[in-house]
Every structure is written in structure tokens, then in C-alpha cells.
Amino acid sequence: MTAKAGATPTRKTSSMFKDAKAFSTFSVNDLQKAKECYGKTLRLEMSENAEGLKLNLAGGNTMFLYPKPNHTPASFTVLNFPVDDIEEAVDELTRLGVRLEEYNQPDLKTDEKGIMRGPGPQIAWFKDPAGNILSVIEEA
């Protein structure tokens, strides 16, 4: 982190953020489609206000989705859903009409179900209606 130009830093550490209830945000291009995806399809609890959608996730975590007219989908995973059984999660997503992403790159290959199987956790990716990348992930 860098200090503001011309500012003289007076201390090197801070405890101000340690207990802050931080949350992440990402943009979508259509708030109604996002509400259907996250609320109806994935059945996440949410609330809506004038600025966007607040997703209430397990463990008291939250994410905020905001509409952006010139939205560009994230080229990385913005939200991971840890699952106990990747097969069951992928089957459920498929049943709900969600299309899993397919990758066939040297270090990133998915199988016929859309699951990358090791090394590391088993993971499957899918996109929300705005093109943002989400995943289900089963850690060993």
C-alpha cells in the first residue's frame, strides 16, 4: 500500500480494520436477472435496496451486487461455494439448467461433467447471467 502523495505517514500499523465486517462487491448488467439467478435458482437469501442486491451467505458473510451499465464480466472466480460432494453439486446445478464451464488448457482441464479433478481441490465453474464466474468446490 502506498501513502497519499505528500502525506507523512505517522504510524506503520492499524487496528482499525481488524474487526471491520468487510464484504466484497461485483457488478452485474441486469439486476432482475441477477435476482432470479441468485435468489430463485441458487436460493440465496438476499435483500434489495436502491444501490443493488445484498447476498446473505452462510457464516454471516455478505456480498453486494450492483448494476453497472458498462459491466464487463470478471475474468476470474468472484464467488466460491464450498460443497461436501462435488458430484451432487454439479448434478444439482445441471438439473437447475446451469451450464458448467468447460476448460481444456494444459494446467486446467475439466471432465465431461465440468469438474476439474486435482491436483488440489475438485472444482467446477459456472457463470451468472452477467458472465461473472462462480464455482462449487470440494476440498479434500
Image: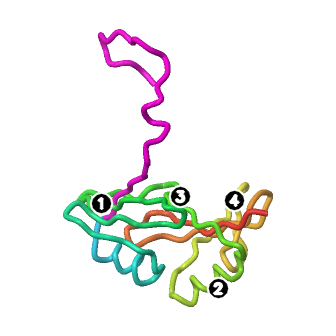
Give, as a three-letter code, the residue at label 2. Answer: Asp
Type of secondary structure dominating the magenta stretch: loop
Secondary element at image label 4? strand
Give, as a three-letter code, the residue at label 3. Answer: Thr
Identify the residue position indicated by label 3 in the image. 77
Spatial CA span between label 3 and label 2: 20 Å
Identify the residue position indicated by label 2 in the image. 91
Earlier sequence position, callout 3 versus callout 1: 1
Residue drawn at x 72%, y 56% is 106
Secondary element at image label 2? helix
Spatial CA span between label 3 and label 1: 17 Å
Q: Are marks 3 and 1 in contact (CB under 8 Å)?
A: no
Q: Are marks 1 and 2 in contact (CB under 8 Å)?
A: no
Identify the residue position indicated by label 4 in the image. 108
Task: Report x, y in % for residue 87.
Answer: 71, 80
Q: Which mark is residue 66?
A: 1
Q: Residues within 10 Å of mark 2 (few under 14, many from 20)?
A: few
Spatial CA span between label 1 and label 4: 30 Å
Asked if residue 79 lies left or right of residue 45, the reply is right
